[in-house]
Image (cartoon, rainbow, N blue to C red):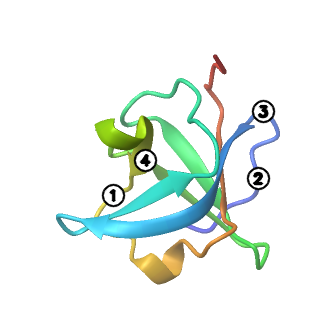
Amino acid sequence: MLEHADPSARKLLTVNYRGTYDGHVCVYPEVGVGEVASYAAIELRRPDGTIISTRVEELMMIPREHLRVVVLPRLLVLNDVPIGTEVWCADVQRR
């Protein structure tokens, strides 16, 4: 699961808050999330320099805050995604 950085990837978001929902870690961006699909391959580039390759489980909308939240697979726990973690994806389109 620990990998080397993909040079073709682009930064999707920086985690400034994370929580859990139905057993999944959810990450909340400091700014809006670019266009990324559920099940897209992503890299979690953590502040300590390690990288976890995983995927987006789904995107969830929080209507009252007009915020899209990235839901990660169940195999990850909160300690895997510290505040400041950067989420990178090879296939992102910014709006």
| Amino acid type at image mark 4 | Val
Residue 59 visible in the snapshot: no
Q: Amino acid at mark 3?
A: Ser
- In the rendered view, does 14 fall on the left or right side of 52? right
- Amino acid found under the numbered disc labelled 1: Pro
Tell me whether the residue at label 1 lies in contact with that at label 2, contact meaning CB atoms closer than 8 angstroms: no
Q: Nearer the viewer, mark 1 or mark 2?
A: 1
Q: Is mark 3 in CB contact (under 8 Å) with mark 2?
A: no
Instruction: Pick the quarter of the image with the C terminus.
Output: top right
Which residue is more in the foreground, 68 or 80?
A: 68
Q: Quadrant of residue 22?
A: bottom left
Q: Residue at x 41, y 46 (%)?
A: 69
The picture places residue 6, in percent across and down from the top left corner, at 75, 44
Q: Position of residue 65 (x, y in %)?
A: 41, 42
Task: Report x, y in % for residue 11.
Answer: 73, 41
For marks 2 and 4, give the CA distance. 20 Å
Distance, label 1 to label 3, CA atoms, is 23 Å
Q: Secondary structure at mark 3?
A: loop
Task: Determine whether 71 is above or below 82 in the image.
Answer: above
- Between the residue at mark 1 and the residue at mark 4, the CA separation in whole angstroms equals 10 Å
Q: Earlier in the sequence, mark 1 or mark 2?
A: 2
In this figure, which residue is indicated by the disc labeled 2? 5
Based on the displayed image, in which of its 4 quarters is residue 51 positioned?
bottom right
Dot label at residue 70: 4
Q: Which numbered disc covers residue 73?
A: 1
Circle 2 — which element? loop
Instruction: Identify residue type, mark 2.
Output: Ala
Q: Quick one: SS at disc 1?
A: loop
- Measure how far apart labels 1 and 2 are at the Cα level: 20 Å
- Side (left or right) of 55 relative to 32: left
